[in-house]
Amino acid sequence: MKIAQVWIEHPVLKLDTPFSYLADDCAEKGKRVLVDFNNHQIVGFIEDVFEYSGTIAQFKLEKGFDLKPILSVIDENPLFNDELFDLGKWLAYETLSPTISCFQAMLPAKIKPVNNHQKIKMEKYVHIIKKADLNQLTVKRQEAYNALQFHGEMSLSKWRKDFASMGIALEKLGLVGQFEKEAVFKEKDNFVLSTDLELNIYQKHAFDEIKNSKEDEVILLHGVTGSGKTEVYLQLAKDVVKNQKKQVLILVPEISLTPQMVERVESRFGSSVAIYHSGLNNQEKYEQYQRVALNQVDIVVGTRSAVFMPFHNLGLIVLDEEHDQSYKQESTPQYHCRDVAIHRAKTFHCKVILGSATPSLESYSRAYKGLYKLITMDKRVNENKAKCTLVNVRDAIKRRQNPLLSEPLLAALKARLLRHEQSILLLNRRGYTPLVRCEGCGKTVQCPHCDLALSYHRHENLLKCHVCGYQRPLLKQCDCGSTHFQFGGYGTQRLEELIQKEFPDARILRMDADTTSRKGSHEKILNQFGKGKADILIGTQMIAKGLDYEKVTLVGILNADALLQRSDYRSVELTFDLIAQAAGRSGRGNLNGEVIIQSYDTDHYAITAAASADYLRFFKEEMHYRHVAQYPPYSYLISIQFSDFNQNRCLSQCKNFRQRLSQDGYKVLGPGELLKIKDQYRYRLVLKGKNLQQMRKELWEILQEVKKERNLSDIKIDVNPMNLE
Ligand code: ADP
Ligand code: ZN
Ligand code: ZN
């Protein structure tokens, strides 16, 4: 008899082990099945099927439990080939996550191994089921019959539209029959095609260097914003598709924020492009996934999860804006898209290009050491550099001016309005004010579920928690009896109000998580701005990325050092990235650009280096501090976070876990108490050491033991965490 090893759909540590079921002939590695688990029908995923020489009774004797049969096999064909299956297993070990969570992360929702996966949309078709004697048919019916014979099959809707009653008659005669087929992607055909630009000497150099590099080289393309990296990607992609007949994957941070990249790729490659991102609905995602599986596209442009697409013959991977935080998935499995891309590229023996104006310290130091090939493009295509001014906010406060709107910024905005040019203002804080404080007792208003202050949102007159989503109206009275509240700080809503007051005629757009919650709203706002229907675009960090509008000649960065106040080891790097990227939006066309950076601290190297677009200076300074503190890239970190509604249980499990760690060759920091979130207490251990493989291996072994324990707190592991707040 056959026995299948099946992963259960629940992605928790405790169940991270394959369970045995009696299998039939349909059961095969990589298919989903329906099984009974603790008297619940759930979905499983087959790891393997093997022959067992004994009987069911012998099995019970040997293993101590009853062998239940698989209830049904869901898939006709395995969902993964060997490459993808191995990738899932690799990912589970790499990120120390439950195996099933990796298989789930790799598949589109329609075919995920979970119980509530939705039905795939089917469409009706017609085809000929019996050969007709044409002489028996009227001329009109003959026409319909011949047309169908010519096409082989037709969608029912087209058949009805073209042949109406003639078609129905042929069906009644039993000559034509209906059948169902999965709905497929309807290709657009209205692409406005563009041709290659002639590469300048720097682009040509980069192109040649990459083309002539080793077949599985990782290349870091460090090019300042506006240096024309995208054109280099596009021409390399074309070379791979045309000359090697292979596929290309272009990864981008968040597609809704970079519609321009999609436009540029589509305008070069037309219908052979699949787009894959969170803005698509599940059916659309599935259709795109299938196009890749059926080898119908040459190029995929997508966000993080597109790295798991079922490619046949990948010839190049581009990871644009490789430093971007959105490449890291923050829920289980906490993988970094860059690691997966590099791993897959090894399997396919293809090149990876990591592109950025502000590379992550990890990537740049690897390139510095020669592990990656470093290519630099330090000139903008249009050769002009934006003029950059640093404004110290303390001076404005001394002169009793609004700290958010310094005189130089107001003057610059006014000049843009007069010249009909556009401005972008970055304030990385949404809402009206980040704090509300009672004047009576001095308390800030907190979220009841988290250790966090509630932000005030004026338009809806609501207080909101930006972490758990809790919201409530602003009460008239505090518990202490006072009715007076103080609104502290500035968010984008308040900034918009201030600017509108200063410039009543200015047309302002605001882009933040509040104005972009609806599908398609990003594109809409950017589209309006791109068409010149607004003078000023105000927004949070989402406006710092990828935008390329030639009318934008002023970028104002307000509260530039806000991020520096965080305790996280990466906050300096994030500050540099944010300012440098935002500044890069100014003066991208033929008009000269200006950047104004407002900050309390105008001497900090992250700010001065970003202001002069001097990545190398930033890199060297920051590496010095990372070296002193032995933070990445000088070490590797693994965070182990425990969370539980019961505080004591949480802390004691965290302490027990610490006891198990050998601390051989690495240090353990913690248990550190984290802020309570959604009523859960949280404690964390951090492993810090130079040998990631060894730390991972030891942890993996400990987890095999820990998962057998009862009443386990929720344990979340993050290998190479992006932040440690
Ligand atoms: P990056 O991706 O490095 O920020 P882009 O690829 O967006 O830069 O290029 C900046 C601008 O320069 C774009 O508007 C692009 O169309 C233009 N551009 C790029 N390469 C060329 C070229 N070789 N000739 C003319 N214009 C170019
Ligand atoms: Zn009070
Ligand atoms: Zn909350």
Image (cartoon, grey):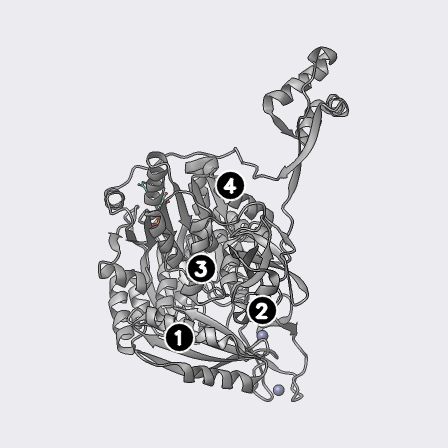
Image coords of residue 39 (percent x, y)? 68, 66
Q: Does 254 appear above or below 644? A: above
Residue kind at label 1, given as amino acid type: Asp
Q: Position of residue 647 (x, y in %)?
A: 55, 85
- Give the foreground label among 4 and 1: 4
Q: Amino acid at mark 3?
A: Lys
Examine the rendering and report whether any part of residue 114 can be seen.
yes
Residue 298: x and y in percent read 43, 39
Identify the residue position indicated by label 4 in the image. 291
Q: Relative to 11, does residue 475 appear above or below in the rendering? A: below
Kindly identify the residue that appears in the image at 58 percent across and 85 percent down.
439
Q: Which residue is mark 2?
A: 61
Q: Which image quadrant is residue 38 in?
A: bottom right
- Give the residue at mark 1: 568
What secondary structure is marked by label 1?
loop
Q: Earlier in the sequence, mark 3 or mark 2?
A: 2
- Quadrant assignment for ligand 3: bottom right
